[in-house]
Image (spheres, rainbow, N blue to C red):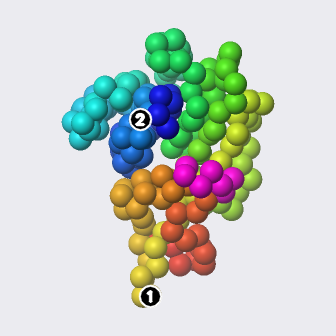
Amino acid sequence: MENEHVLVIGGTGMLSGVCRWLAEEGATVSVIGRSREKHKQLTDLLEKSESINPLIVDYQDYLKVEEEVKRALDRIGPVSKVVSWTPYNQVLEFILKLVSEDQGSYDLYQVLGSRRYFEKNTLVLPSNCNHHSIYLGFIIEEEKSRWLTHEEISNGVIEGIKTRAQEYIVGTLEPYEKRPQ
């Protein structure tokens, strides 16, 4: 991933491990997140903190998102990957439209909750976007189940990116009735 530009939407929480991994692999990672403090925590954990380009903005603030994403694209160049953890397809479609202008093909790794596995994905994609779904399930231990930890989520998303599979499941999704309540 040396010299790649990767955009991560929602990358300061449970996907912070993904952002660190991308940066350690040599990518410049533009991270959309709302919290200045969480962005600082992310960069403090890196040797090469300059590999993280913080875009401190609420991704539902379309005007600010447009300004920040365009600034990142102008400064760093086109993206090779988008990793997204947002439940709002409309927001993601808006960001993908910004990313898709004047560039070749790129990969979208859409991180989705377990319930979304059983629903039709209505996301409208630009023609130069290669879509990959990464579903977050749960873990069954003996007779009990639990949700994935942030570390398990990050590690699973990293594996999903590495495999480049169209669909990748972290944990398990079935039997669905065994998911934690």
Query: Which image quadrant for residue 110?
Result: top right
Residue 59 appearing in the image: no
Figure label count: 2
Q: Residues within 10 Å of mark 1 (few under 14, many from 20)?
A: few
Q: Look at the image and give the residue range highlighted in magenta.
A: 161-167
Q: Considering the numbered disc 1 on the image, is that residue within a helix, a strand or a loop?
A: loop
| x then y, percent, for residue 56 | 37, 24
Disc 1 versus disc 2: nearer the observer? 2
Please give the residue where the numbered disc 2 appears in the rendered image.
26
Q: Is residue 88 left or right of residue 154?
A: right
| Mark sitting on residue 143 | 1
State the separation of the CA atoms marked 1 and 2: 42 Å
| x then y, percent, for residue 154 | 42, 53
| x then y, percent, for residue 62 | 54, 20
Q: Residue at x 36, y 58 (%)?
A: 151
Residue 138 appearing in the image: yes
| Mark sitting on residue 77 | none
Q: Nearer the viewer, residue 65 or 170?
A: 170
Image: 115 above or below 71: below
Amino acid type assigned to the residue bearing label 2 in the image: Gly
Q: Residue at x 46, y 13 (%)?
A: 75
